[in-house]
Amino acid sequence: MSQGHRSGHRRRGRGDSSSHPPGDRILVLPGQELPAAGLRPGRGTYRVGGKVYASILGLLSPKPPFVHVVPLSGRYIPKPEDVVIGTVTDCQGTFWLLDIGAPRWAPLHMTGTPWNVEIGETEKYLRVRDSVVVRVENLDATGRIGVTMIGEGLGKLEGGTIVNVSPARVPRVVGRGGSMIQTITRHTGAQVAVGQNGRVWVNGSPEAIARASDALRLIDEEGQRRGLTERVESFLVASGGSDESGPTLPPRESAHRDAVPGPTAPGGPGDEPGDSDTLGSGAEDY
């Protein structure tokens, strides 16, 4: 990269960073120099000549010791240990094909479930269009995605509906300490489960599902704005009464046939048992 190219980055980066007061959410462009003194390049960034630049369009997110750029949009790129919501698209003799919103299908092998599935009997357990909660177990060199349904909180989802948001919006959907999820569940009475792939499962009464879904779409459309939690709360108050008692537990079938059905309560700071079922990490408030 030429010296002139770096100078252009420096001039643009300094101008942008100095025009924002501390705490402001800063939109950065690909190739823009970032105010990253003492920080290492993280997601959405790269280093050239001792300086850090944005590689994507997104929001600046310093998280020492790294500086990240959170994309405004984009397709889900799986990472090991991500907990995601998938939809069955095909049933084969020994596995199911899942759509998890990634560039490739994710096969769920019958040995990756706690069920004693016989060869050729996969449709007895999961059928096309069923939704499941799985964990990304591994990614091989060819891009093949390995997933499993064995683990705490994983299994088949019963009832409800799936709302799709941009995977980049997942931290905003969850909120700091689960604050956004709590706002939605408190005001709608719905139960909400968020996958790292941008799939959000909503369950409850028809009215609760509709109002929670509208709130999720609002977050998806305006996730880059400050004061989003207050904006969503105002929207929900205006659209109907508040259910301060919280949601009731939905009919969710655990993958473990002998387990007691029901969601896994979140354990992050500020969460209240029964308020939500946050399936993945990434509750970063950027």
Image (tube, rainbow, N blue to C red):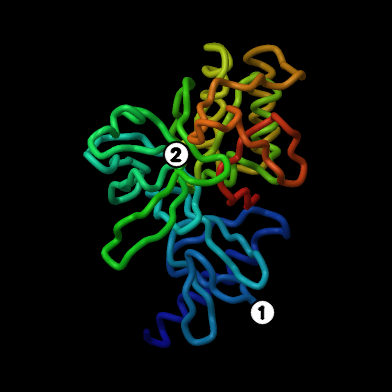
- Left or right, residue 226 beside residue 3: right
According to the picture, the residue beneath numbered tag 1 turns out to be: 38
At mark 2, the secondary structure is strand
The answer to which of marks 1 and 2 sits earlier in the sequence is 1
The image quadrant where one finds the N terminus is bottom left
Instruction: Residue at 47% x, 29% y: name it.
Output: 157
In this view, the residue in front, 164 or 34, is: 164
* Residue 137 on image: x %, y %: 43, 56
Classify 237 as above or below 171: above
Instruction: Residue at 61% x, 60% y: name it.
Output: 61
**Residue type (three-letter) at the residue carrying disc 1:** Gly
Numbered tag placed on residue 124 in the rendering: none
Instruction: Residue at 48% x, 21% y: name it.
Output: 160
- Left or right, residue 193 beside residue 232: left
**Separation of disc 1 and disc 2 at Cα?**
37 Å
- Left or right, residue 206 beside residue 76: right
* Residue 165 on image: x %, y %: 46, 37
At mark 1, the secondary structure is loop
According to the picture, the residue beneath numbered tag 2 turns out to be: 85
Instruction: Residue at 54% x, 31% y: name it.
Output: 258
Mark 2 Cα within 10 Å, few/some/many (few <14, many 20+)? Answer: many
In this view, the residue in front, 186 or 118, is: 118
* Circle 1 or circle 2, nearest the eye: 2
Residue 59 appears in which quarter of the rendering? bottom right
* Residue 273 on image: x %, y %: 73, 33
- Left or right, residue 144 beside residue 217: left
Mark 1 Cα within 10 Å, few/some/many (few <14, many 20+)? Answer: few
In this view, the residue in front, 38 or 104, is: 104
Q: Are marks 1 and 2 in contact (CB under 8 Å)?
A: no
**Residue type (three-letter) at the residue carrying disc 2:** Ile
Residue 274 appears in which quarter of the rendering? top right
* Residue 239 on image: x %, y %: 62, 15
